Amino acid sequence: MRDDEKKRWQQWQREHEAAVEALRKAEEGYQRVSAGSGFLSGDDPSPVEVQRDALNRLEEARRRLDEVRQARPDGPG
């Protein structure tokens, strides 16, 4: 494997790892919001709005991971 191919592969691995971590955090956030939305006070946004925002963040993280996976270079081996 040439140096430039190795660098591209390593860069992709870092991007993939970051995208997976972002998805994990978005999933945790959505689960937390879903479990706690019944406890929001009257001053907070509506539970539906809070869940929708969390779901949008989750979907964005999924799309980003898909984009990164689509850009995967040929790896070692």
Image (cartoon, helix red, strand yellow):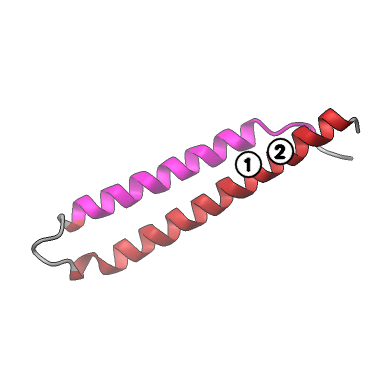
18 left or right of 74 in image: left
38 left or right of 17 in image: left
Report the quarter where the N terminus lies: top right
Specify start and end residues of the magenta stretch as a single range.
48-74
65 left or right of 52 in image: right
Q: Which residue is mark 1?
A: 15
Q: Position of residue 29 (x, y in %)?
A: 39, 59
Mark 1 to mark 2 CA distance (whole Å): 6 Å
Q: Position of residue 10 (x, y in %)?
A: 76, 41
Residue at disc 2, secondary structure: helix
Amino acid of disc 1: Glu
Q: Position of residue 19 (x, y in %)?
A: 56, 46
Q: Is residue 64 magenta?
A: yes
Residue found at the far bottom of this picture: 39
C-beta proximity under 8 Å, tags 1 and 2: yes
Secondary structure mostly taken by the magenta-highlighted segment of the chain? helix
Which residue sits at x=13%, y=67%? 41
Q: Which residue is mark 2?
A: 11
Residue at disc 1, secondary structure: helix
Label at residue 72: none
Q: Nearer the viewer, residue 72 or 6?
A: 6
Amino acid of disc 2: Gln
Image height of 35 relative to 50, above or below: below
Which residue sits at x=34%, y=49%? 55
